[in-house]
Amino acid sequence: MAILELRGLTKYFGKNLAVNGLDMVVGEGQIRGLIGPNGSGKTTVFNLISGFLRPSRGRVLWQGRDITHLPAHRIAKLGLARTFQLTALYKELTVLQNVVMCAHLHCQTNLWQQFRRDRKTRRKEQRTENRARELLEQMGLAAIAHERAGELPHGHAAALGIANALATEPRMILLDEPVGGMNPTETAETMARIRAVRDSGVTLLLVEHDMNAVISTCDEITCINFGNKIGEGPPGAVCGKPEVVKAYLGEDVGECFL
Amino acid sequence: MRSINYKQAVVLGTLPVILVCAPFAISGYKVDLLTNLLINIILVSSFRLITTTGGWSLAHIPMMGCGAYATALLAGQLHVPFLIALPLASLCAGLVGLAISYPLGRTKGFAFFVASFAAGEAIRLCWIRFKFPFGGHRGLSVPPPAIIDNVGWLDFAEARPYYFLALAVTLICLAIMYRLDRSRIGNTFRAIESQENLARSAGINVTGYKMLAFSLGSFFAGTAGVLLAHRLWAIEPHQFSFTTALYLLVWVVFGGAHTFWGPIWGVVTLTFLSELLRPLAEWVPMIFGAIIIVTLIFQPDGLEGLPRRLRQMK
């Protein structure tokens, strides 16, 4: 069953066509990779899906419902979370506080209760914190729960980024370059975590440059170039496609390569 | 319960004594200065409330003016009793804040700075342009508050009783703002300043929270305006001009805006300093300018960062 569907998604920046009529269907429970050379419009697609940008044309369907014109925080509420390139974190907060802050939606307290902090509210806040601790345990961050997020090494910061997304209790997460700038060990660890997240029932869509990581982790791949879809299917099949090779390596080299 | 250490106990013990005894040890004129300081303390704290979401508003002084004008109309023209006019006028300022925060909440950084200045000036020009009901350049008169008639020590036209009235209002306002700052709401404000996009993707209605911070800040600025108006007995648009906003910025930059107490330290220190420099009155703006430059270069965190820095130097 499709959890996310893009229909003819198009985005112009001024006269530049960043995404051109992109159709894509992401099935529930899979890890989908979105690949393409630099500047091919991958992050734009993410921003269009998550409500940070408005598409010029086309629609985004979430579990069959049109979410194209919803603001970002409403889309997050529906269970579609995202991470950011170079991992955006609340740098001056601790690891635990980061996750607690991102569990905002599930605190279930209104402003007046948050101001008064009566016993019931404090119990709810305690519950949120316990849930955050569980998440840290799951992501292997429990030991550093009280370190400041701004001082974490790259691997831990990425894990915290995913934990932050999980804290919103999503059905699906968009991961923007989860292993960007990581060494092979960190990459392997992060990819294992991503598979564990998938196994817990969350659908994932990830943008990534590290082809080994993509091929070894994703169930299906969509490749785009200059905003056009040039290939889709299982990793092995997509990477062998002449158009894809050409897009990555250039016309001439592509021919030699084949 | 949180344990209180020795140093805090000394401060918590002596501060109330000073606050209560001070007005009896000094002349009436100086009591008025203290009252003014209390009003400015509400002002800087409410200003900091807005800065926690990341925007430095130049509309804050006009917001204070909204409270002052509202009470001038309510208490002065409609004869509403002070204790009712105070929250009502604050609410008026809060509502004006809510209205202008709708467009302002969509701007960021420098754009917010400029847009808030424009919004504030627009409000101020309304007071000048509309002679009815705002009285144009000459402004409006405000009666001294009468809570219970014909009791000597409750005559709020006098400096000392008014000081205690202002003190009570200030403490209530500070308590509410402190609570707010420490609650999840305050954390959310800071989260928005820190990483707006992450907050958005965690389901936080960023624009909504920015509007909330701006309206609450305007509400308390309005309270400060009410207290000011009832002490001065008259208000005019010129009092709420850009120059006053600059002083506000100086206080907050000098004190530092990261902690709740920073701006309060700033306004207290600089008020006493300008009192000491009274013989050099013409030079005070220049000295303040120098203080700001020196602060920004050598101590960008403001006064509040000093203790930590001194500890590190040891």
Image: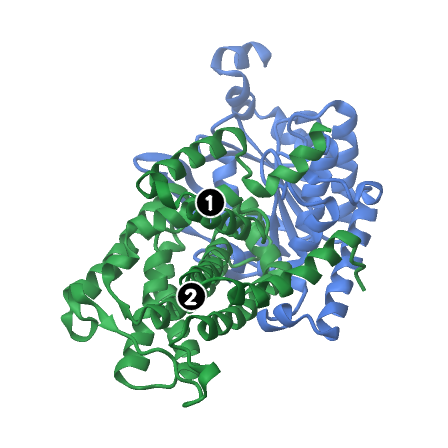
Q: Is residue A97 above or below residue B288?
A: below
- In the picture, measured across the screen, residue B135 lies left or right of residue A64, that is left
- In the picture, measured across the screen, residue B173 lies left or right of residue B235, that is right
Residue A213: x percent and y percent?
A: 71, 29
Q: Is residue A100 above or below residue B163?
A: above
Residue B273's mark? 1
Residue A187: x percent and y percent?
A: 74, 29
Q: Nearest to the eye among marks 1 and 2: give it.
A: 2
Task: Calculate the distance from the C-alpha at mark 1 to the C-alpha at mark 2.
Answer: 19 Å
Q: Residues within 10 Å of mark 2 (few under 14, many from 20)?
A: some
SS assignment at label 2: helix
Q: Provide the letter of the chain coloured blue.
A: A
Work out whether residue A138 can be spotted.
yes
In the rendered image, residues at marks 1 and 2 fall on the same chain: yes
Q: Residues within 10 Å of mark 1 (few under 14, many from 20)?
A: few
SS assignment at label 1: helix
Residue located 35% across and 86% down the image: B80
Label 2 belongs to which residue?
Answer: B28
Along the viewing direction, whichever of A18 and B306 lies nearer the viewer? B306
Say what amino acid the circle numbered 2 marks: Gly
Disc nearer the start of the sequence (1/2) = 2
Residue B11: x percent and y percent?
A: 69, 56
Say what amino acid the circle numbered 1 marks: Leu
Along the viewing direction, whichever of A69 and B177 lies nearer the viewer? B177
Q: Chain of mark 2?
A: B
Q: Colour of chain B?
A: green
Colour convention:
by chain
Quadrant for residue A192, please give it. top right
Q: Chain of mark 1?
A: B
Work out whether residue A55 can be spotted.
no
Q: Is residue B238 above or below residue A16?
A: below
